[in-house]
Amino acid sequence: MTIVEALARLERGEITAVELTQQALARIDEVDDKVAAVLTRLDDRALAAAAASDEKRKNGEALGRLEGIPFTAKDMFLVDGVRTTAASKMLDNFIAPFTATAIKKLEAEGAILIATVNQDEYAHGGSTEYSAYGPSKNPRDIGRVPGGSSGGSAAALAAGIGLFSVGTDTGGSIRQPAAYCGVVGVKPTYGLISRFGVVAMASSLDVIGPFAHTAEDAALLTDIMAGQDEMDATTIKSEKVVSDVVSPKRVGVVREYIQTLDADVRVRYDEVFAQLTKAGWELEEVSLPNLEFALPCYYVLTPSEISSNLERYDGIRYGSSTESAGDLEAMYSATRGKFFGPEVKRRILTGTYALSAGYYDAYYKKAMQLRTLVCQDFERAFSEFDILIGPTTPTEAFKFGEHSADPTEMYLADIMTVAANLAGIPAISLPIVGVSDMPLGLQIMAPQKGEAAMFGAARDAENILQVQLAEVKL
Ligand code: GLN
């Protein structure tokens, strides 16, 4: 069920918020032993909110734009009084002392948080295999990963747990799992949505965004979460950014993304491009030659920012800590050694190295220069095209263990998503039919603050493509 459909049913009195919430919670009982998407259930909190929502509706009070709609949130979002782990043992017992702005805005519109969901530890990864609480499974094939890092969000939604989810995207963590699980995922313009109360990964790239079943639902959620926040100085003015969607005229197909695809995957995208062309889209191939530097650039800048952001987990301020016999330094290293997982440590080490005095110029500064080149490529492309399209990922969801032996193989799955984060531009992934029964993602990118064009194109593409994915059987 989409949000729009559920709102109509609530409005007609065919279902209550309590019933919708009970259904979502019952779905956890039914399928989560197979999917393992959920980390912390919030049954009591959710049912109380649902009852209050029904009461409001009964009394004819003013209703929110998401009144009575159940949802899940990646475990990066702080919710007052609720355990927030970022899927790390470092935050195993951490209870949030306040609520993230994005969650506050959703709840202020009547949405009902039913559970927090799984992810890679601190959002480092692309499969949920790096979660300290074990991986989630792809509901379309439980032998495959749901993607990551927001894999629990995509898996929960695809499995019918809640009607939307919220995640974070630093290099593809919303779009890639959306593509792997066959749902819509949005990475908005950098700064569009406040990150106050959300665990930081790499602050010059992190954004928050929704998972939904349709572009229309996703646009509504983006619109609700957007807005300046005095608690996040990077937030931008958002009037009209997401409202008044427009149809795109000039559409560029990113050459560097399609030319590397395997032949059978390429066929699927060519079919989609042909359908769009037949419906009147004017597609033209465009080259962004510096995209080849995006992935190495991302994997220098991101660990650098991670090494700085994760300094705060020292065993003293908050989070887990060890008793250590030695001095303060020994206590820091015992705590960080014990509670951080291997991928988190790898990134802290790489980042510290790239920022160190002797290597700063060779690595960090070089990566910053490459970032500028990538941004300039997008500026050039958007002077000619309203939107750019291409695949979200090079392949369908991979099998467990396929990329976990060599970390750089896992990094390669991000090759088509990281550039949008480097450039701060919005991008959406829409489900299309894949080679097998698994889905693939069509990625649509727009210039900064170009959400209206992005959502307009997404809506049109959905109408043209009429995608029917294989049914989820659990
Ligand atoms: N998979 C990417 C990484 O490992 C993206 C992570 C993210 O967007 N949070 O860094």
Image (tube, rainbow, N blue to C red):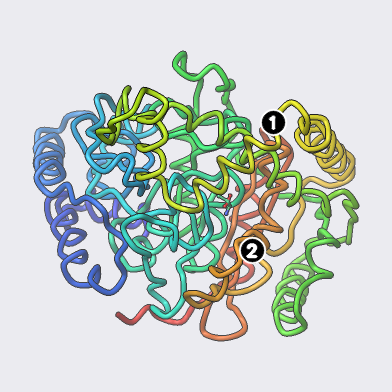
Mark 2 C-beta to ligand 1 under 8 Å:
yes
Question: Residue 233's spot in the image, x, y percent?
Answer: 54, 16
Q: Three-letter amino acid code at disc 1?
A: Leu
Q: Three-letter amino acid code at disc 2?
A: Ala
Q: Quadrant of the N terminus?
A: bottom left
Question: Residue 405's spot in the image, x, y percent?
Answer: 56, 70
- Mark closest to the chain's N terminus, 2 or 1: 1
Q: Residue at x 62, y 84 (%)?
A: 435
Q: Residue at x 74, y 49 (%)?
A: 248
Q: Quadrant of residue 122?
A: top left
Whether 11 is drawn above or below 231: the answer is: below
Count of labels in the image: 2
- Label drawn at residue 413: 2
- Label drawn at residue 355: 1
Residue 122 seen in the figure: yes
Mark 1 C-beta to ligand 1 under 8 Å:
no
Question: Residue 40's spot in the image, x, y percent?
Answer: 22, 50
